[in-house]
Amino acid sequence: QVQFVESGGGLVQAGGSLRLSCAASGSTFIINAIGWYRQAPGKQRELVASISVGRRTDYADSVKGRFTISRDNGKNTVYLQMNSLKPEDTAVYYCKGGRLPAYIDDSSAYWGQGTQVTVSS
């Protein structure tokens, strides 16, 4: 079992920044890739950024150049640095980790409880 706990969400004005954290505990050695997803009201959950055990990163086009995903293996934590935030970034942000790449719909993956990000105009 693996547990993920997200933190760092909040209310920020457009153009501002936030850094989200996803702390992992438990059998973290089974995790090969972690992704940050978000879900806005009335919309489907979408993959925002992902990072593999080899530190390969991928981003959704909507956040490229603004968001940066990174990991600190010593702290079992993955971060999402979000800059130049826009109102359309408002969503609940979740981290997901599993053996498979983050973009794969993996029923055995683990999810955190989410953290709310609200960007005001």
Image (cartoon, grey):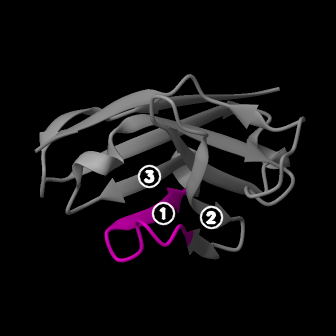
> Mark 2 sits on what residue?
51
Tell me whether circle 1 and circle 2 mark residues in contact (CB < 8 Å): yes
User: Magenta stretch: residue 108 in it?
Assistant: no
Measured in 3D between alpha carbons, the distance from the residue under mark 3 to the one under mark 2, in whole angstroms, is 10 Å
> Mark 3 sits on what residue?
79
Q: Amino acid at mark 3?
A: Tyr
Stretch of the chain drawn in magenta: 59-72
Whole-percent x, y for residue 50 in the image: 61, 61
Q: Is residue 83 above or below residue 40?
A: below
Residue drawn at x 31%, y 49% as measured from the top left: 88
Tell me whether circle 3 and circle 1 mark residues in contact (CB < 8 Å): yes
Whole-percent x, y for residue 41 in the image: 45, 29
Crowding around mark 2 (Cα neighbors within 10 Å: few <14, some 14 to 19, many 20+) is many
Q: Amino acid at mark 1?
A: Ser
User: Magenta stretch: residue 71 in it?
Assistant: yes
Q: Earlier in the sequence, mark 3 or mark 1?
A: 1
Q: Earlier in the sequence, mark 1 or mark 2?
A: 2
Task: Assign a secondary structure to mark 1.
Answer: strand
Q: Is residue 42 left or right of residue 120?
A: right
Q: Residue furthest front?
A: 42
Quarter occupied by residue 26: top right
Q: Nearer the viewer, residue 8 or 90?
A: 90
